[in-house]
Image (tube, rainbow, N blue to C red):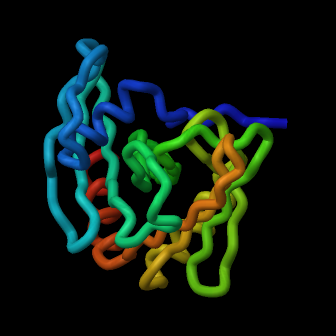
Amino acid sequence: MSVKRKSTPSSAWKALALAAGLSGLALSGIAHAAAPEPIGTYKDWKAYSVSEGGNKYCFVVSQPTDTSPKNVSRGDVFFIVTDWGNGNPEPSVVTGYTYKANSKTTIQVGSDKYDLFTDGDGAWFRSEADEKKLINAMKRGSDMIVKGTSSRGTLTTDHYSLSGITAALDKISRSCN
């Protein structure tokens, strides 16, 4: 049973991450989305806020430091943690390809492993409790490994640096709560 999370990467949120400087791609089809405002760079993580419809949302993003296999063509790949102003940061993955149907993504930080459900090119947690566990592990860890399987059956592995994540999350918590 799938729980639809608030931050299911809509094209608007993907565009916000792209607009935040993660890609040189054009931002077509997002006239309704406000432009993100940079609120800080913390080593390998960037923090942004977005005001839309009288609400303020914040997010941190990072791109992988290494991906494999190298010979696979993918779109933009990033890890995003969104703060909707409720004090519960919500992590998600955008992988740059469509996931294999009914597959899962695995995230590893140190010896801790987490499974996320997938839909299209994104992956999320089913529960806030698991999100909190990952966020705590990210704050303690130095790197994170994200593995997923594409609709073509290709297993990908993305390595992320966690350098700066604690400061970035603290910034968005102060900015959006």
Residue 41 percent across, percent down from the top left: 17, 63
Q: Residue furthest front?
A: 71
Question: Measuring 22% from the left and 24% from the top, which residue is drawn there?
Answer: 34
Question: Measuring 46% from the left and 27% from the top, which residue is drawn there?
Answer: 10
Q: Quadrant of residue 151?
A: top right
In this picture, residue 39 sits left or right of residue 140: left
Residue 58 percent across, percent down from the top left: 31, 44
Q: Which is nearer the eye, 115 or 73?
A: 73
Residue 69 percent across, percent down from the top left: 52, 65
Question: Measuring 46% from the left and 60% from the top, which residue is drawn there?
Answer: 71
Decide if residue 33 is in sight here.
Answer: yes
> Relative to 51, does residue 139 appear above or below in the rendering?
below
In this picture, residue 88 sits left or right of residue 154: left
Residue 48 percent across, percent down from the top left: 23, 47
In this picture, residue 78 sits left or right of residue 17: right
- Number of disc labels: 0
Q: Quadrant of residue 14?
A: top left
Q: Quadrant of residue 143?
A: bottom left
Question: Measuring 18% from the left and 30% from the top, which residue is drawn there?
Answer: 35
> Relative to 114, does residue 9 appear above or below in the rendering?
above
